[in-house]
Image (cartoon, rainbow, N blue to C red):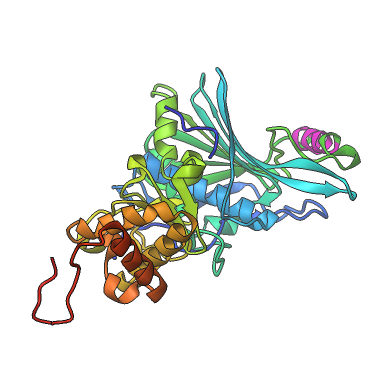
């Protein structure tokens, strides 16, 4: 079922760490792409690279770049990253907007990008407005993401590896950006080396896109159409090679489960804090996200969390595992709970229950990471809820019951 409208280290590559999009920002002063020359670029990746990666992993990288590019280009606050969804008989539309002020008392809604799944053809599109792509982004490690605290990726490989994984699964990866077309495929003597062929569209096509964009934004109007322009935007289009099964709607929804933004809990099921978000409900139990992207869900020593969490900061390794010391992670979880309980005191009962779970990572290192205020709050709750119970004794030889 589609979601509601609201919305430690092995060396196998993963491009995400803690930083931003692999796309550049398109200049508003003009379109200068003379450096993007037609030709074939060998990317140095063999067909069997990262054999464990699935199409879902590849989609994660496309989505991450889509989101990070929008955050960077339009200087958005990534928390929360609110998307709008509209499902029709023909397609699924996911859009991101912002309000821009027009004068003192008027504003208009501006479309910043979109994701669209076309059901009949099984085609997936991810469009970033006011973005650009340069051949240097095809070099492994080349990225614009470094040192970006708002965004979720830095390794700079995901863009290319995602194309490889999709291509070896008989998908067609076609990009329109920087006034050229980018198409991925396998070349070399054995047809097993990933390459990108860059070609230029007809001059009339570029002129048509120029004219259409000028018409859409005439008189200061904000963009609102789900239409991309080859000279101004980046659009990734994923379809299927002839003779192979096209992408199905359920596959798209399965891939989309990597992003909390695409399956956002209802307001009563999420509590947002400066340290991260507490996700409530069985569907989120044990799910861990970093800046909105799902990562390895295990807790300390491989034990699963009872609740879901979306950490506001942190880093991950190439296997989508969190690179965080256990005690530091426990401290963040404790801080999330403290702020969540302050907002919704009735959750205190649920927090106390976690101490009955054997080796619960939700309350790991509680004796050292829980603040004095939270400890006093829990203690007062225990006294009020069970006034006749014995919880501890001053005699160190006495055993708590």
Residue 73 percent across, percent down from the top left: 67, 55
The answer to which image quadrant residue 116 occupies is: top right
Residue located farthest toward the front when viewing the structure as drawn: 388
284 magenta-colored: no
Task: Left or right? Give the position of 1 relative to 53.
Answer: right
Residue drawn at (10%, 76%), measured in percent from left and top? Answer: 398
Residue 64 in the image, given as x and y percentages of width and height: 51, 50
**Relative image position of residue 304 (x, y in whole percent):** 25, 53
Kindly tell me whether residue 67 is visible in this rendering: yes
Left or right: 99 in relation to 151: right
Note whether 191 is above or below 364 in the view shown.
above
Q: Residue at x 31, y 73 (%)?
A: 327
Q: How many marks?
A: 0
- Judged left or right of residue 188, residue 133 is right
**Vertical relation: 242 (above or below) 76:** above
Taking the spot 43% from the left edge, 66% from the top edge, the residue there is: 314
**Image quadrant in which the N terminus is located:** top left
Q: What range is drawn magenta here?
A: 204-214
* Nearer to us in this view, 263 or 243: 263
Q: Position of residue 389 (x, y in %)?
A: 19, 62
- Image vertical order of residue 351 relative to residue 399, above or below: above
16 and 51: which one is in front?
16
Q: Main secondary structure of the magenta part?
A: helix
Instruction: Classify the position of the C terminus by image quarter.
Output: bottom left
Choose between 22 and 244: the one closer to the eye. Answer: 22
**Is there any visible trace of residue 191 in the rendered image?**
no
């Amino acid at each position: 079922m589609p979601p509601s409208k609201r919305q430690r280290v092995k060396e196998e590559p993963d491009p995400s760490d803690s930083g931003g999009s692999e796309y550049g920002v398109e200049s508003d002063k003009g379109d200068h792409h003379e450096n993007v020359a037609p030709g074939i670029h060998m990317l140095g990746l063999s067909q069997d690279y990262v054999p464990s990666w699935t199409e879902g992993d590849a989609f994660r990288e496309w989505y991450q770049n889509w989101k990070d590019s929008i955050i960077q280009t339009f200087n958005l606050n990534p928390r929360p990253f609110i998307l709008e969804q509209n499902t029709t008989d023909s397609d699924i539309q996911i859009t991101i907007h912002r309000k821009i002020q027009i004068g003192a008392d008027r504003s208009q809604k501006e479309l910043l990008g979109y994701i669209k799944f076309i059901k009949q053809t099984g085609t997936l599109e991810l469009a970033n407005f006011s973005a650009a792509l340069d051949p240097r982004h095809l070099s492994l490690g080349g990225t614009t993401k470094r040192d970006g605290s708002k965004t979720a990726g830095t390794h700079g490989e995901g863009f290319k590896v995602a194309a490889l994984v999709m291509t070896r699964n008989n998908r067609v990866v076609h990009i329109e950006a920087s006034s050229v077309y980018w198409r991925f495929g396998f070349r070399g003597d054995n047809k097993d080396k990933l390459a990108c062929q860059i070609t230029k569209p007809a001059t009339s096509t570029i002129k048509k896109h120029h004219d259409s964009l000028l018409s859409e934004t005439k008189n200061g109007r904000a963009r609102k159409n789900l239409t991309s322009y080859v000279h101004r935007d980046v659009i990734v289009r994923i379809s299927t090679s002839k003779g192979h099964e096209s992408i199905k709607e359920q596959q798209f929804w399965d891939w989309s489960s990597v992003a909390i933004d695409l399956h956002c809990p209802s307001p009563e099921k999420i509590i947002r804090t400066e340290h991260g978000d507490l996700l409530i409900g069985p569907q989120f139990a044990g799910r861990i996200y970093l800046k909105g992207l799902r990562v390895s869900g295990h807790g300390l020593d491989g034990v699963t969390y009872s609740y879901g969490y979306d950490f506001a900061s942190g880093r991950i390794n190439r296997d989508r595992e969190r690179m965080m010391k256990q005690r530091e992670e426990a401290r963040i979880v404790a801080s999330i709970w403290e702020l969540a309980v302050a907002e919704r005191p009735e959750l205190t009962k649920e927090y106390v229950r976690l101490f009955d779970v054997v080796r619960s990572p939700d309350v790991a290192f509680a004796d050292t990471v829980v603040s004095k205020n939270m400890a006093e709050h829990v203690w007062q709750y225990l006294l009020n809820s069970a006034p006749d119970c014995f919880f501890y004794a001053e005699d160190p030889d006495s055993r708590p019951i």
